[in-house]
Image: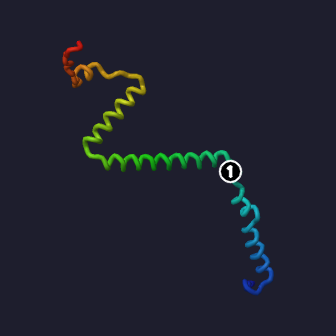
Amino acid sequence: MAVKLRLHSSPFVKVLLTLLVLSLYSPGLAAQKGNRPPKDPQKEAAKKEEAKVKALDRDIKKLKKEFRKKQDKPTRKRMKTNKVRSKRQSENKKEPWLKSLFKRRDYKKVKKGKGV
């Protein structure tokens, strides 16, 4: 005895399909999307501050690079040596002895005049 079921016309099948569809969409699944832990406002503020500092550093670097690019070669070289000297001086380090040995010195001859 073969029983033919018409899927569209049988009320039993309609109820079964409806229950199946409703069970797939449960409120628990929809709620899982919103179950994130609350964001820490201090962390967010720190991240924003860090991003702001990075952007500022990037801008300063860019401006310095443009400024150096505008200078001619001897000026850039002089700026570099002065930067190195000032860094050494701020760290309280003196010049290497070999460098000071071969450094060019301008000895000015003092003229002996009448008053001396």
In depth, the one of 8 and 108 nearer the eye is 108
Q: Position of residue 97 (x, y in %)?
A: 28, 19
The answer to which image quadrant residue 112 occupies is top left
Residue at image location 63% in from the left, 48% down from the top: 45
The answer to which image quadrant residue 96 occupies is top left
Question: Which quadrant holds the C terminus?
Answer: top left
**Total count of labels:** 1
Could you classify mark 1 by the number of other residues whose Cα lies within 10 Å: few (under 14), some (14-19), or many (20 or more)? Answer: few
Taking the image as shown, residue 107 lies to the left or right of residue 42, namely left
Mark 1 is on which residue type?
Lys
Q: Position of residue 2 (x, y in %)?
A: 73, 84
Q: Position of residue 64 (x, y in %)?
A: 39, 46
Q: How is the image coloured?
A: rainbow
Residue at the disc numbered 1: 39
Residue at image location 68% in from the left, 50% down from the top: 39
Residue at image location 38% in from the left, 27% down from the top: 88
